[in-house]
Each structure stands twice: as structure tokens, then as C-alpha cells.
Amino acid sequence: MFKRLSCLILALVLMITPLAAVNVSASSVSDATKGVVMVYAEFYDADGDLMFANTGTAFGVSYEKGSSSVSVGEETDLFVTNRHVITDENSDGSYTLADKVYLVYTDDAFAITYYYSASTLRLSNMKWDAEHSRMVLCNVVDYSEDFDCAILKADSTASGRVALELTDEAASSSVGDTVYAIGYPGVSTDVFGTEDLQYSSDEGKYYFTYKFDGSVSAQTLTQGIISRIGTTSYFGGSVNVISTDARISSGNSGGPMVTDEGKVVGINTYGYTDDEASTYYAIDISYAWELAEENGYTLNITSSSGVNLALIIGIIAAVVVIIVLVIVIVALATKKKKPAQQKVAVTPAPTPIPAPAPNPVPSPAPANDPTAKYPRVQCTAGALVGKRYPITGILRMGRNPNCNEIIIPGDASGVSGVHCQLEYVNGIVYLKDLGSTYGTYLEGKGRLAANQPMPVKVGDRFYLGSKNEMFEIVNKGGTK
């Protein structure tokens, strides 16, 4: 009996041991492009009319949930992207989720038409045209308000788009290592001259239509060098990030940052450019793993040694089952040999130790605190010259009177409908471009990356589109 039992245990050990050394076969950077897809998110008003749309990038992941599973390299229906791709930030700091989120795998699925004033050739409005039958609808599984991360579940898989290999190698990466940012960077309308515009007699305007291409061949793969691995507080808390010079723009936000082997170490999130240098950031891939885990999905992620963590967990579980079976078999065999009146001692199961509760994140000071000495923003050149506004919370600036607290007259050159915003949080003023056409510029620093807050102080000057619309941060009373 015990001889046969020993042989059984040895056979099981020999079956499990090779698995512990399994390496997921390394892919290449070019292979990683097969897991990247364009995201198209629509936001509607109360009447059901399309107000605007966001574009970005997502990438496929392998996972296990219940009886469902997808392996690395297989077609998948679970994707990771940035939160800011599928939400819009409200004036109170909360987020509004897009009404519909799609994945775009082909070209000609949607387009944006930019209309220009016939007299001034300034951008006046935009129109989104989408062919939803050429897209795949998604359900937003969840998104994090603490980290710029979201999980999408597509209604179906798409031929040719596969799950990428995730790795925790960011923890073992070094400054100087090569990484790549993959995605669909947005188009800049700044470069279009009159020779590119067509005239619409019905609209009485010039227009230009840009058709978006969601195919693999339309992706941009940008090489960069890791300059720092650390944390940042741009997201309201301490967030692990990878700093690099691999360019990240508004369109490839949410795409993967990969190693030379095509392994995903981070999620491309935002960038900062000034007159001297540019720095771009990807948040650590572990945030996607945690968010998926909270919603019942276990993402397959390999350690820096190449061992699949999900596989290790499975091996441990299998070993536990084997040990339990061995104990039961031994107990039964022993019970048969002992007198009937003899009792077999049973070792009680250990009591599980509850996980410690997370430390609460402190809330920002209320914006209406009557004791706070709020700074002001003062217009020093342009349509609102001489006017000054207190920054007590969030101030949006732009031409649309329905969406802004500071309304720029419609004839102001280079100003979008919703151009930028100032926000006062815990004694600090943050300036953020809201995806404007001609950009928001911080004097001495250059153009701000879209949707990424930049801290500013009293005396800092910034302008909207051009220096014709210049503003300055000042103290109460207009002093510096």
C-alpha cells in the first residue's frame, strides 16, 4: 500500500516540477503590435445628441475567470486602457463615464470634420461621424479614480488581435534600458494650410475631414530610454511610474509600454514637454492587475525571472490538493490497521488572518473654505484684458458659454470651445489643457500635454493658442 502511494507521490512531483521552470515564450516588439487596438468613446447630452468623442489606445490581456481563460498570444476580449480615455472629468473633480465605448480594428470606421471660418480661417467647430458596424462595442468592467487605469470587456474577440504578455520587470528594469510605446497618436490640425481645406457652400465654411485608421499598420511604435523608475503625485497620490523619452501623445494614451521582448511593463499615460526636454510616463502594469483582480479577473503576469505568477499559484494549489489527498489516504490506511476503539487525532485548520484594511486617502481641502487665500488669474493680453477671476475650485476657459466659467469671446484667435482649466487643490493651482486644437502654453515651458495637470505658481504666465490671449497667476489684488 505505502509502496504504491510513494510511487504515486513521486509521479505527481515529477509532473509538477518542470512546470515551475516554464518560461512563456518571449515575443518581439513587432509581435506586440498585434495586441494593440484603437479606442473610440462617445459622450452624449441629455437629448441623446453626440457632444464629443475621445480617442485612445488599449491592449489585449490574457486572463482567467471561472471556466473562461485566454492565454498569451490568443485572441482576447479583455483590454486595458487609461481611465481618461473613457471618462470626462467634471468641474468638481468627479468623472463621467462615456455613454458608449468601442474598439476600432479597421480603417474608415470613424472620422472628424474640422470646420473653419471662411473669413478668418479659424477653427469654428468639429463633427464626428462614426460607422458603428465597423467597431466592436465594449463594456467598461471598471476604472480606477486613484490610478489612470480602466478594464474593457469587448462583446466579441477580433481576428488578429491577441493577448500580450504582462511582466513585473519594471521592478528589475534599470535607467538606460530600452522600451517602446505603441499606439495611435492623435492628428494635429495645426499643420493644415488653406491648400488642404475644401469649401462647403451649405455651411459657408472651409472644412477638412480626417479619417481614423484603426488597423495594425497605422500604429506608431516609438523607441525610448528609461530615465527614471519611481513615483509621481500628478494623479492625486503616489503612483509608480516609468519615465522615458518614448513619445506619448493624446492618441496613444492607454497603449502598452513594452520591452525589447515585447513584454508589457506599463500603460502609456501622459507626457510633458518644455523648450528644453520632453518626459513621458507610463504607470506600472501592476495597477491593471489589481483592478482586474477586484472584478474577478486574474491577469496572467510573469515575474522578472520569466515565471508565470498565475502558473505558480496554480502549482501551489495543486500541491495543497495532493497533500490533502495523501493525508486522507494515510489516515484511511492507518484507521484500517488500528483497533476500532482507537481515535485518530485531527489537526484543526489554521484560522485565516484577515488582510489589513487599506489606509484611507485624505480628501482635498474644500474649495469653499472661507479662510483660504485664493490666488487669481488675470488676463494681461487679449479679449478679457484687465479682468481678474478668483481660483476657488475649477475654472474652465474657452469660447463655449455653456461649458466654461471664463468665457472667451468667439472672435478670439486660437481658442477652442473648451480650451483649458485651472484647479485649486490643497493650496496648489494646476493648469490643464483640455484637448484644445492650438494648445495651451506655459511661458518658458512650452506646450502642455493634453489632459495632464501642471502645477503653476503666482507669477507664472500662460497663453491660449497664441500670445494674443495671455493670462497670469496673481495674488488677491493683482499682486505677484
Image (cartoon, rainbow, N blue to C red):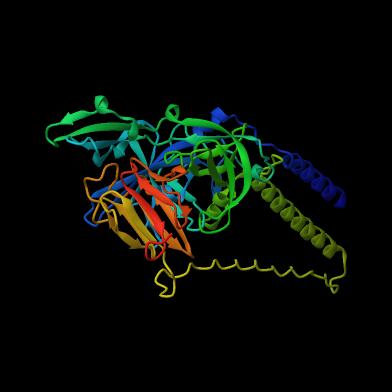
Q: Residue at x 79, y 59 (%)?
A: 327
Frontmost residue, 130 versus 275: 275
Residue 139 appears anywhere in the view: no
Residue 249 coordinates in the image, percent (x, y): 45, 39
Frontmost residue, 209 versus 417: 417
Frontmost residue, 213 versus 439: 439
Q: Residue at x 32, y 45 (%)?
A: 53
Q: Residue furthest left?
A: 202
Q: Residue at x 79, y 69 (%)?
A: 347
Does residue 303 appear to the left or right of 412 in the view shown? right
Does residue 201 appear to the left or right of 329 in the view shown? left
User: For residue 308, which quarter of the picture?
Assistant: top right
Does residue 46 appear to the left or right of 394 in the view shown? left
Q: Is residue 355 above or below residue 179?
A: below
Q: Is residue 215 above or below residue 248?
A: above
Q: Is residue 6 above or below residue 480?
A: above
Q: Is residue 23 above or below residue 415?
A: above
Q: Residue furthest top?
A: 195
Residue 449 coordinates in the image, percent (x, y): 44, 44
Residue 40 coordinates in the image, percent (x, y): 37, 42
Q: Quadrant of the C terminus?
A: bottom left
Number of marks:
0
Residue 32 coordinates in the image, percent (x, y): 54, 33
Residue 82 appears anywhere in the view: yes
Does residue 127 appear to the left or right of 284 in the view shown? left
